[in-house]
C-alpha cells in the first residue's frame, strides 16, 4: 500500500514566510540598515525558497500533482533538468 503524503499547508505557510522576509528586506534596505543585517535576511529567504522547492518536489514524487501523464521518468528528468540548469 503506497500512501500519498502531500504538504499543501506547509507550502503555503513557507510561501507566506518568504513573502514576509522579502518585505523585511525591502524595508531594511529603505532604512539603510547595515548590509550584514540585510544579507542575513536574504540568506534566510533563500533557505526558505530551498525548503519550498524541496516540498514541491517531494509532493510531485509522492503523486500529489497528478497531471494524467504516464511517463513518470520523463517528468522527473524534467525536474532534474530545471534544478541543475546552469545559466
Image (cartoon, rainbow, N blue to C red):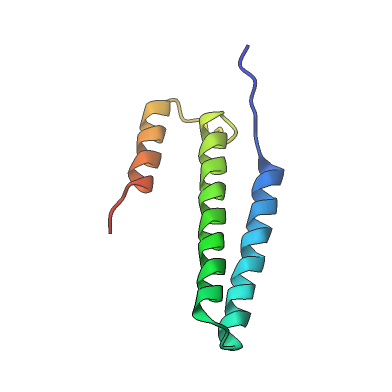
70 above or below 46? above
- Quarter-of-image position of residue 18: bottom right
Q: Quadrant of the N terminus?
A: top right
Query: Which residue is drawn at the image coordinates 67% and 43% (left, top)?
Result: 8
Query: Which residue is drawn at the image coordinates 64% and 48% (left, top)?
Result: 11
Of residues 3 and 75, the one drawn nearer to the viewer in this rendering: 3
Query: Which residue is drawn at the image coordinates 65% and 29% (left, top)?
Result: 5
What is the x, y in percent for residue 40? Answer: 54, 67
Q: Which residue in the rendered view is the most extreme toward the left?
A: 87
Query: Which residue is drawn at the image coordinates 40% and 41% (left, top)?
Result: 79
Q: How many marks?
A: 0
73 above or below 19? above
46 above or below 50? below
What is the x, y in percent for residue 22? Answer: 59, 70
What is the x, y in percent for residue 14? Answer: 65, 53
Q: Quadrant of the C terminus?
A: bottom left
77 above or below 24? above
Q: Which residue in the rendered view is the most extreme toward the top?
A: 1
What is the x, y in percent for residue 76? Answer: 40, 33
Of residues 68 and 81, the one drawn nearer to the viewer in this rendering: 81
Amino acid at each position: 500500500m503506497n500512501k500519498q503524503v502531500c504538504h499543501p499547508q506547509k507550502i503555503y505557510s513557507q510561501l507566506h514566510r518568504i513573502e514576509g522576509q522579502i518585505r523585511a528586506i525591502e524595508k531594511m534596505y529603505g532604512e539603510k540598515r547595515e548590509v550584514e543585517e540585510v544579507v542575513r535576511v536574504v540568506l534566510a529567504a533563500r533557505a526558505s525558497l530551498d525548503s519550498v522547492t524541496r516540498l514541491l518536489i517531494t509532493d510531485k514524487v509522492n503523486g500529489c500533482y497528478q497531471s494524467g501523464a504516464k511517463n513518470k521518468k520523463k517528468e522527473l528528468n524534467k525536474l532534474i533538468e530545471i534544478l541543475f540548469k546552469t545559466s
